[in-house]
Amino acid sequence: MFTCELVPGGFAKEISAAQAAKVVARIVAEDTVRSAADTARVELATELLEQLHGIDEQRRAVKRRLGQIVTASRTGLTQIYGVGPVIAATTLGDVGDVRRFPSRDHFAAYNGTAPIEASSGNRIIHRLSRRGNRQLNHAIHMAAVTQIGHDNNPGYVYYHRKITEGMPPKSALRALKRRISDTLYQQMISDARTAALQRSRDPGGQSGNDSASSVTGSHPDTPALRTSHSRASTDPTSAARTRTRRPTRARRSKPDS
């Protein structure tokens, strides 16, 4: 904003922080600042650009960290065209265990890519669903936009084939988003099966309940009941006291009356 005010007429379109920094540097180098108000604008623009550079660096750091996390998860989502580390991390974070969705239709209803029928009479119409996880829906939307913008992927061919068949562009985009949703679901199911197979082959994993500790806990020698609750006592002195009877006292004879 301050950079636009420093240039007569402003800018015809939005500019990036790097472009704005070049403009401010050029204005300072040309020494075209005359009034105190212009000086204040240059100072405020410089401070704002420094903050923007810091935010950009934080975004790049977050993206690098997400990339490392996605790589460590060994998912195959990034093999799908248009799905980068950010979209993959968003999908994995929101979905969690994909096996909680019985089918791809349930997953599509969850992320809002399943169209809602709005038919009237003999006219069959499907409209956009506003339900479901909107964050995940936005991630799928960005993947669809990426596929449409490049002609070297199956999503581009699918989208334009739908338009050729007479489908409106918005409807074709919704169809592509549903197609991407199904692809994400199948890939996550495949990842889950691969992970389960690796766990079953892991020699360091648990191999059943063949130890005594699996029943009694971490202390197998400890009885399930307390000593006072068990019928048999393990103390020999207590057993001896149990077997020894207390002598009975002799009854006194009454005197003859």
Image (cartoon, rainbow, N blue to C red):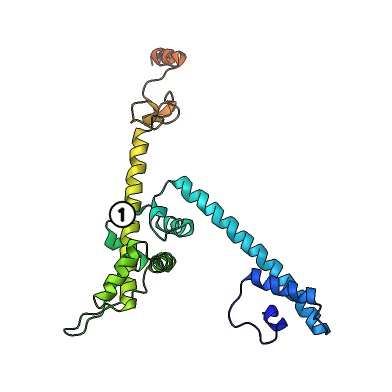
Crowdedness near tag 1: few (<14), some (14–19) or many (≥20) residues, C-alpha within 10 Å: some
Element marked by disc 1: helix
Instruction: Tell me residue 178's x, y (percent).
Output: 31, 66
Q: Quadrant of residue 110?
A: bottom left
Residue 116 seen by the camera: no
Residue at (79% x, 73% y) in the render: 29
Residue at (37% x, 37% y) in the render: 199
**Farthest residue, direction left:** 122
Relative vertical location of residue 239 with respect to residue 188 in this rendering, above or below: above
- What residue type is disc 1 on? Gln
Q: Is residue 17 left or right of residue 198?
A: right
Relative vertical location of residue 29 with respect to residue 232 in this rendering, above or below: below
Query: Across the whole image, how many numbered discs are drawn on residues?
Result: 1
Instruction: Tell me residue 59's x, y (percent).
Output: 59, 61
Residue at (35% x, 33% y) in the render: 201
Q: Quadrant of residue 24?
A: bottom right
Point out the image quarter for the N terminus: bottom right
**Residue placed most toward the observer, 23 or 86:** 23
**Residue placed most toward the observer, 82 or 185:** 82
Q: Is residue 122 left or right of residue 185?
A: left
**Residue placed most toward the observer, 207 or 130:** 130
Instruction: Tell me residue 57's x, y (percent).
Output: 63, 60
The residue indicated by pointer 1 is 186
Instruction: Tell me residue 202's x, y (percent).
Output: 38, 33
Q: Is residue 6 left or right of residue 86?
A: right
Residue at (35% x, 52% y) in the render: 188
Relative vertical location of residue 207 with respect to residue 64 in this rendering, above or below: above
